[in-house]
Image (cartoon, helix red, strand yellow):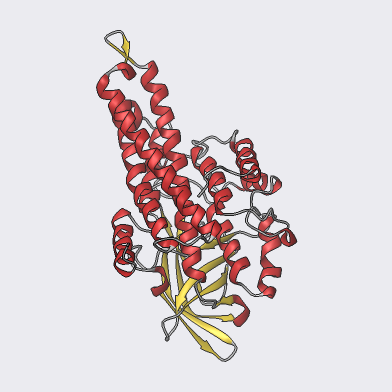
Amino acid sequence: MDFTFTEEQQAAAEAAKGVFAGVAPDAVPSPALTPGAVADACDRALWAKLADADLLSLLLDARYGGAGLDAIALCLVLRESARVLARVPLLESSAAAAAVQAFGGEETKSALLARAGRGELVLTVAAHGRTGHDPAELAVTARQDGETWVLDGAQTAVPWAYDADVTVVPAHTRTGRTVLALVPRGHEGVVLAEQFSTSGERLGELRLESARLADRDVIDADGAWEWLRDLLATGTCALALGLGERVLRMTGEYTSQREQFGFPIATFQAVAVQAADRYIDLRAMEATLWQAAWRIASGAPGALPAAGDVAVAKIWAAEGVRRVVQTAQHLHGGFGADVDYPLHRYHAWAKHLELSLGPAAAHEEALGDLLAAHPLA
């Protein structure tokens, strides 16, 4: 195992820093003051800049205009995006395109991948199930009817549902297999209902009512959904890490300037100890993130399947990012809740990331199941 980043991975991270350098985390209204969504759409100008910098095609092969990089490179870019609360479907679109490339048919790849890499086509994934607590693949049924597939069910909290041209929907068949349906926006039998995240972003409840898809629009390869789910979870951990690192830096800057009794409060032992604990959280989040991303990127065997490393990373990310933002709010005092200061936005995003794709407890249960099925020697 070698956690040294390659030149190509480092170049992707540097390119991302350049693109995100001018992004302001408070570019939209505060979610605390907005009853609905903070904006009707994602940041299309930023999306175009990401496309121009070839950051939307990181995971795609050269024949689709991509760089042919891996999950580690994607996580490095996602880490940078979270530091500025970038309002783009970078994780969902990149992961969905990678799944199509790895498991889709040639016709589907030709129709979607090059356009997705250029930013002309936006993809998202319905990964939260019917309620956000049940497995996503059980929320929708899929049955074959001649040369078409018929889908019924509902998926909640679909990110960027109103921006996406295609939504990847996991669904289960009568035989217990999971397929991935590529559902176009506005398709017959598909209904979207507005939902809103704690961060103020517009989500969608996706309802499928006897929606019919051609066979080419359904990926039925074994392991496709599991692979995509692990990549999404790992990317979510990268977002949590980037957000947490930015929040801890904000806290360090504030406590170094804020004085009590003639001294910066950062010099007080109680403040320093709390900040140190959160630094340890971030380092643990980082180590487990790269372990999970490395397993996905390399396909290397381990004592547990890669899903075990993903579960460990998600446990640390969910609990760690919550502790980081809570400590930041505490050390900022009332200033942290000021809607003119961006910390409360980071807190709202952190809560969304903590619960996204399952809270820590859900992944602890999954890890326990893996340990029971693969006892360690």
Does residue 239 appear to the left or right of 147 in the view shown? left
Q: Quadrant of residue 96?
A: bottom right
- Residue found farthest to the top: 262
Up the image or down, 75 lies above or below 135; here it is above
Q: Which of 311 and 242 lies nearest the eye of the viewer?
A: 311
Q: Residue at x 57, y 50 (%)?
A: 74
The percent coordinates of residue 225 (x first, y second) are 49, 69
Is there any visible trace of residue 191 in the rendered image? no
Up the image or down, 164 lies above or below 351; here it is below
Q: Residue at x 26, y 9 (%)?
A: 261
Does residue 214 appear to the left or right of 173 in the view shown? right
Does residue 8 appear to the left or right of 350 in the view shown? right
Is there any visible trace of residue 91 in the rendered image? yes
The percent coordinates of residue 207 (x first, y second) are 45, 71
Q: How many marks?
A: 0
Q: Residue at x 73, y 58 (%)?
A: 62
- Residue found farthest to the front: 377
The percent coordinates of residue 334 (x first, y second) are 30, 27
Up the image or down, 64 lies above or below 105; here it is above
Q: Which of 231 and 121 lies nearest the eye of the viewer?
A: 231
The percent coordinates of residue 198 (x first, y second) are 38, 48
- Residue found farthest to the bottom: 146
Q: Which of 155 and 253 lies nearest the eye of the viewer?
A: 253
Q: Quadrant of the C terminus?
A: bottom left
Does residue 255 appear to the left or right of 211 in the view shown? left
